[in-house]
Image (cartoon, rainbow, N blue to C red):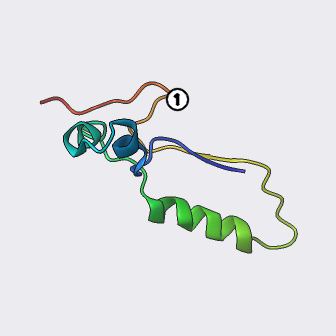
Amino acid sequence: SVDPGAAETEFSNVRFHGDDGRANKVYEGYTPLTAPDIADVVCYVANAPAHVNLLQVVMECTAQRSAAVLSREGP
């Protein structure tokens, strides 16, 4: 499995019922993963040599300390 951490997706916009301002605040103060970041890893996994066995890939942005903790820049 490829398990991405904090990634900028449409989820926040859906979560806040189309409120772009609130959705964008989720990503303030840090650089989240992007779709191309995740796609690069998925491409590697799909094209890995036959002798490579990838059981799980957990990827997080550098600001992410755990599933619930992000180190955001100060104001």
Q: Position of residue 54 (x, y in %)?
A: 78, 56
The quarter in which the C terminus is drawn is top left
Q: Secondary structure at mark 1?
A: loop
47 over 75 or under it: above or below: below
Residue 17 horizontal/vertical position (percent): 33, 39
Residue sitting at the far top: 69
Q: How many marks?
A: 1
Q: Is residue 24 above or below residue 65?
A: below
Which of 44/15 is in front?
A: 15
What residue type is disc 1 on?
A: Ala
Q: Which residue is mark 1?
A: 67
Residue farthest along the left direction in this orientation: 75
Q: Residue at x 70, y 65 (%)?
A: 45
Residue 12 in percent (x, y) is at 37, 41
Question: Does residue 26 appear left or right of residue 11 in this picture?
Answer: left
In this rendered view, identify the residue nearer to me: 32 or 16. Answer: 16
In this rendered view, identify the residue nearer to me: 7 or 74. 7
At label 1, counting other C-alpha atoms closer than 10 Å, the crowd grade (few under 14, some 14-19, many 20 or more) is few
Can you name the residue that lies furthest to the right here?
A: 51
Q: Quadrant of residue 39?
A: bottom right
Q: Is residue 48 left or right of residue 8?
A: right
Query: Picture coordinates of residue 36 (x, y %)?
Result: 46, 65
Query: Which residue is at a point 53% across and 59% down the rendered structure image?
Result: 38
Q: Say left or right for 28 vs 57.
A: left
Quarter holding residue 51: bottom right
**Left or right position of 47 against 28:** right
Name the residue located 17 percent from the left edge and 29 percent from the top edge: 74
